[in-house]
Image (cartoon, helix red, strand yellow):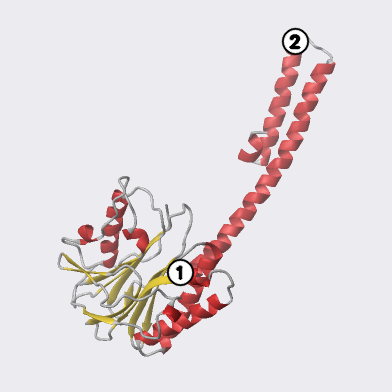
């Protein structure tokens, strides 16, 4: 019976046969040439338990196969929702990292996307409030609407308003607590000449600008409500502009990083590990930050996503960053 959920069908049957053989040998050892009633009951019990174990083994095997198929389907859906970002776009180096809080999960409620458009490189990183199918629906809606808006709309406020309309439409089909569904996000546009960052921060942790060993926090001048709550704030979309010098790296992340705590309850600060000599490589920058994060806390309490893009200096040579999302326990 112990072998049934742990071993293969052949080994389960072999375990039953071995138990039956041992029972028979013990009967001979006691000098029973012919089986006594007690011997018969014992050996019959072993035979019945072996049949039951075979049945359980087949049931467990079917459940494991169904689980494996479900995981493959879930992986395909999740990879489609959160594909790998390109490593090079318009001469810029891009990298992304993802750590799901739940072990063996691929993605959770965090999201990011990068799109090359006629108006420049456009990116988004966000964090959906909540979990389960509602969070998955909002992730799918936001990524789809951002993709369409980023390719077609000429300015950043129009993109944010387009995403807001789609989220409001999804929320309108819910009857219970519609204001509990929202997404904190940063929508970024890099100008075609790659000298200016335009940024619409919707209640999200402020990105960092890493350049020549210094870190600058790109705080918005005006606070804004998260996406999905725009109907409470009006149509205005504040946009901030920042200079982006060659060699600088823009680092964006979700609150799973800055809200990570150590055993003493101290929050993680991403600025110190990014201060100092770092190569102009977004993958190396993100790896340095995540390495410090996992030294600070051994276990994540929330999903954590990070996206970085480096203004590669002309003529510089560096390794191509690894950009595939990584899951683990992100």
Q: Is 69 left or right of 165, judged from the image as shown?
A: right
Going 34% across and 57% down the picture, which residue do you hit? 259
Identify the residue position indicated by label 1 in the image: 82
Residue 7: in sight, yes or no?
Answer: no
Going 27% across and 78% down the picture, which residue do you hit? 91
Observer-nearest of 86 and 107: 107
Observer-nearest of 136 and 10: 136
Location of residue 12 in the rendering, given as x and y in whole percent from the top left corner: 67, 36
Identify the residue position indicated by label 2 in the image: 30
Q: Is 85 left or right of 130, judged from the image as shown?
A: left
Q: Could you tell me how far apart the alpha carbons at marks 1 and 2 are, in whole angstroms? A: 68 Å
Location of residue 286 in the rendering, given as x and y in whole percent from the top left corner: 29, 62
Quadrant in the rendering for residue 160: bottom left
Disc 2, SS:
loop
Location of residue 18 in the rendering, given as x and y in whole percent from the top left corner: 69, 27
Location of residue 272 in the rendering, given as x and y in whole percent from the top left corner: 20, 58
Q: Within 10 angstroms of label 1, few (less than 14), some, or many (20 or more) residues?
A: many
Going 76% across and 13% down the picture, which residue do you hit? 28
29 over 183 or under it: above or below? above
Q: Within 10 angstroms of label 2, few (less than 14), some, or many (20 or more) residues?
A: few
Going 33% across and 49% down the picture, which residue do you hit? 297
């Amino acid at each position: 019976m112990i072998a049934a959920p742990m071993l293969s069908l052949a080994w389960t049957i072999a375990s039953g046969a071995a138990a039956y053989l041992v029972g028979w040998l013990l009967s001979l050892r006691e000098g029973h040439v012919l089986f006594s009633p007690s011997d018969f009951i014992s050996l019959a019990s072993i035979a019945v338990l072996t049949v039951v174990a075979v049945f359980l083994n087949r049931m467990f095997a079917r459940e494991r196969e169904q689980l494996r198929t479900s995981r493959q389907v879930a992986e395909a859906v999740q990879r489609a929702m959160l594909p790998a970002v390109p490593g090079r776009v318009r001469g810029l180096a891009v990298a992304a990292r993802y750590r799901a809080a739940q072990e063996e999960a691929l993605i959770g409620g965090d999201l990011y996307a990068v799109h090359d458009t006629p108006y420049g490189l456009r990116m988004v990183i966000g964090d959906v409030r909540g979990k389960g199918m509602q969070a998955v629906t909002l992730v799918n809606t936001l990524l789809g609407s951002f993709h369409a808006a980023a390719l077609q709309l000429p300015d950043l406020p129009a993109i944010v308003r387009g995403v807001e309309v789609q989220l409001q439409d999804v929320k309108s089909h819910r009857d219970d607590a519609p204001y509990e569904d929202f997404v904190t996000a940063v929508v970024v546009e890099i100008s075609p000449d790659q000298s200016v960052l335009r940024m619409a921060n919707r209640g999200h942790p402020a990105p960092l600008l890493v350049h020549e060993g210094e870190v600058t926090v790109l705080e918005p001048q005006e606070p804004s409500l998260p996406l999905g709550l725009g109907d409470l704030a009006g149509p205005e979309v504040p946009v901030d502009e920042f200079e982006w010098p060659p060699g600088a790296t823009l680092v964006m992340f979700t609150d799973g990083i800055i809200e990570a705590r150590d055993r003493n309850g101290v929050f993680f600060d991403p600025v110190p590990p990014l201060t100092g000599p770092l190569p102009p490589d977004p993958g190396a920058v993100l790896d340095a930050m995540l390495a410090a994060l996992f030294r600070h806390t051994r276990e994540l309490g929330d999903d954590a996503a990070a996206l970085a893009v480096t203004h590669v200096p002309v003529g510089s040579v560096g390794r191509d960053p690894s950009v595939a999302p990584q899951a683990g326990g992100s």
